[in-house]
Amino acid sequence: MGDIRIQSALISVYDKEGIEEVAKELTELGVRIYSTGGTQAFLTEKGFNIIAIEEVTDFPSVLGGRVKTLHPKVFGGILNRRNNENDHLEVLQYQMPSIDLVVVDLYPFEDTVASCTSEANIIEKIDIGGISLIRAAAKNFNDVLCIPSKSFYPDLRTILNNNKGLVTKEERRKMSLHSFGVSSHYDIAIFNYFNTDKEGGLRLDIDNQKMLRYGENPHQKGIFYGNLENIFTKHSGKEISYNNLLDIDAAVNLISDFDSKTPCFGIIKHNNACGFAVRPSVKEAYLGALSGDPVSAFGGVLVTNTTLDEQTAEEINKLFFEIIIAKKYEPSALTLLSHKKNRILLELKEDREVVGYNLRTCLNGFLYQEKDDALELTSHFDYVTNKKPSQTEMEDLIFASKIAKHTKSNAIILAKNRQLLASGTGQSSRVDALLQAIEKAKKFGFDLEGASMASDAFFPFADCVEIAFKEGIRRVIQPGGSKNDQHSIDFCNENNMGMVITGVRHFRH
Ligand SMILES: NC(=O)c1ncn([C@@H]2O[C@H](COP(=O)(O)O)[C@@H](O)[C@H]2O)c1NC=O
């Protein structure tokens, strides 16, 4: 029921790749083919018998190709309802050809934008006729099959081969869905091109979705919208869960702030780093990160900015970790690590594609913000105390500040020799965050004498520097901006502590 036999087709494609094979199959099925200028020339040259669309419209392609298929005879040929008596009479009266199949490949708008060409060139690549053909054919899926881009040629082939040119209503409806997917994607790309300042609101376009086993908890449904293949290669391991994805996101963002010249290693738990170290070798960096909090590290997500070698893999294998993310793996390390079947091994792609904004639901809408990609520049730092940090001390301060940026607010980071000693995370007061960090550092045997402290936001009072000083912490990095900044600065000056003000706050709620 509802099957149609394809007897005529209109082919109008920008990219000619693959169209010869499509034309061949259609010709073998005895389908009459109409085409626009370039497509017709291409297929005629390949030996196919193609009818120029101008023969239908009796009108040339004009305005440099801006108008070629935009004609009532073409759109009437697509949109007429085959079971409607009046439509049938009008088709005869105005000599519209019935078109059962529309094959389009649109002007490459997004590629043209990406090529950074002039606005005039970009505008010319807004397809009008093609998108209209797609919408018309998709609307009339009751009688017409629409193939909206070259990526659907394999589907066309399957459909044609399923039943020798007979197409079911189900197949046409499915292609109609994909057609509106292509047309809406295309329009959103155009919208986003013009919507530079977001004054037009927000249009999201995510067509890849992956059902997750569940959401944050087993009673919550969870779906990931995106394309993980563009971020990493998964070498082995079980299915990635909702919570895994959040930790992977935290790990990838954190590691991206550290250059790849010196090995660094992070251990993420509940989206925060519980261990992090920069060292001359990846194994030392791993051991440095692990000693930060070997208890929390259990079951965590490991991340490194460098090649994970066999010696490090042997160390890692002594403990249970759910996920390992590396820039690369030595083949022997990969073999060793993949012995544990459930462990997820991910290799980050050099040209990974991450979104440049954050989005979260809020009340009856969404909150959108640009991603916090601000990296403190030493040239913008304010060295506000009499005591100025040495170059090595500055390295520790910047190290701690980078980790604070990626830690839940209120966040305090304690670091020494480019190793995370402890952090206070997600506390409702900065003092609590500091006390939590001090307690943890001591628990794992760290001497805070000469350590550095970073805060994700300003100190509202001098209490934090006072507590830090009592513990032997001798330098501080913070964004500044409190009306009480001077109280903290005065205390530092009185006690020979150094303070650097970055001017960049990194709240993370
Ligand atoms: N102007 C029109 O009426 C029109 N009709 C179809 N197109 C597009 O023209 C391209 C094919 O052109 P040609 O066959 O001339 O190479 C396709 O990308 C198709 O989407 C048109 N071009 C732009 O809108």
Image (cartoon, rainbow, N blue to C red):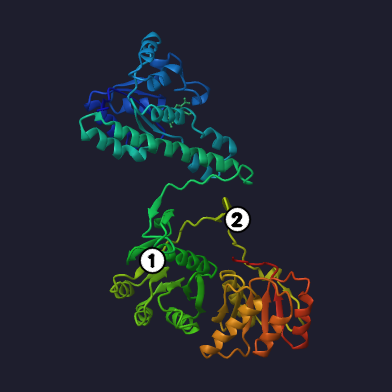
Which element is circle 1 on? strand
Q: From the image, which quarter does the N terminus lie in?
A: top left
- Amino acid on which the number 1 mark rests in the picture: Leu
92 and 68: which is toward the camera: 92
Residue found farthest to the front: 219
Residue 385: x percent and y percent? 76, 80
Asked whether, in this view, residue 180 is left or right of residue 418, the answer is left
| Mark carried by residue 346 | 1
Image point 53% across, 43% down: which residue? 113
Q: From the image, which quarter does the C terminus lie in?
A: bottom right
Asked if 82 appears above or below 117 in the picture, the reply is: above
59 and 200: which is toward the camera: 200
Q: Is residue 392 visible?
A: no
Mark 2 neighbour density, 10 Å: few (under 14) some (14–19) many (20 or more) = few
Asked if 504 appears above or below 283 in the picture, the reply is: above
Asked whether, in this view, residue 363 is left or right of residue 182, the answer is right
Instruction: Look at mark 2 in the image and give the residue it sits on.
Output: 369
Image point 30% across, 74% down: which residue? 332
The earlier-in-sequence mark between 1 and 2 is 1
* Distance (Cα) linking label 1 and label 2: 28 Å
Tell me the quarter of the picture where residue 439 sits.
bottom right
Which callout, 1 or 2, points to the residue nearer the camera?
2
Residue 310: x percent and y percent? 34, 78
Residue 390: x percent and y percent? 67, 83
244 and 48: which is toward the camera: 244
- Amino acid on which the number 2 mark rests in the picture: Gln
Image point 39% across, 60% down: which residue? 214
| Mark carried by residue 232 | none
Asked if 456 appears above or below 239 in the picture, the reply is: below
